[in-house]
Amino acid sequence: MSSTNESMETLAKRRDELKAKLSQIRDMRPGSLYPRFRKCGKPTCHCAKEGSRGHGPVWTLTWKAKGKTVARIIPQGSAAERTREQIAEFRRFQEITHELVEVNERLCDAKLVRPEAEADAEAKKGAAKASLTQKPPRNLKPS
């Protein structure tokens, strides 16, 4: 077996592995989650004291939609943790799809080279068979 065939087999196997990983992707979402602290403005509140970070954290999820940054407030606790997991899953999805595209590209390139070699081999086989079985043209009269 040639190295091109082995390479194509390896690439096809890797592509199938990546497709299987994609089928295991759970809930996902793009974006970034970061904490925000705010001051309420009441002069007697703890947040008004010098050095205080303020109230919070309030978790803010931001992502791009149609070229604009969108933000959503995420409640503290389990909602914020689930959102972190969803963002991590989205990043995993991006990594898998990026690699899948690269593998597919290499596989397509290998398939472009392979048919030329097969066509040359077929042409050689066909030429050998044709010389053995050629009939004379019908429109020529024997002399």
Image (cartoon, grey):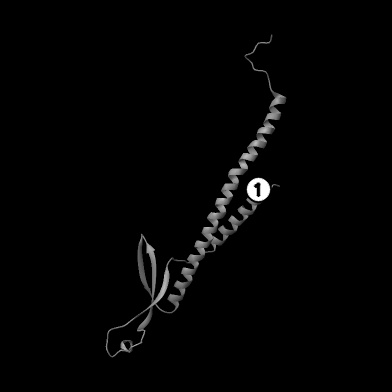
Disc 1 marks which amino acid? Thr
Q: Quadrant of residue 34?
A: bottom left
Residue of label 1? 4
- Residue at image location 36% in from the left, 71% down from the top: 72
Q: Is residue 118 left or right of residue 24?
A: right
Where 18 sits versus 48, above or below? above
- Look at 63% across and 37% down and name the residue there: 119
Along the horizontal axis of the image, is 98 left or right of 115?
left
| Residue appearing at x 65%, y 36% in the figure | 120
Residue 136: x and y in percent read 67, 18
Image coordinates for residue 59, horizontal then vertical, percent: 39, 76
Left or right relative to 17: residue 91: left
**In the foreground, 129 or 20:** 129
Vertical placement of residue 63 versus 78, above or below: above
Q: Residue furthest top?
A: 143
Q: Looking at the rendering, which quadrant does residue 70 occupy?
A: bottom left
Going by the picture, which residue comes out furthest to the right? 132
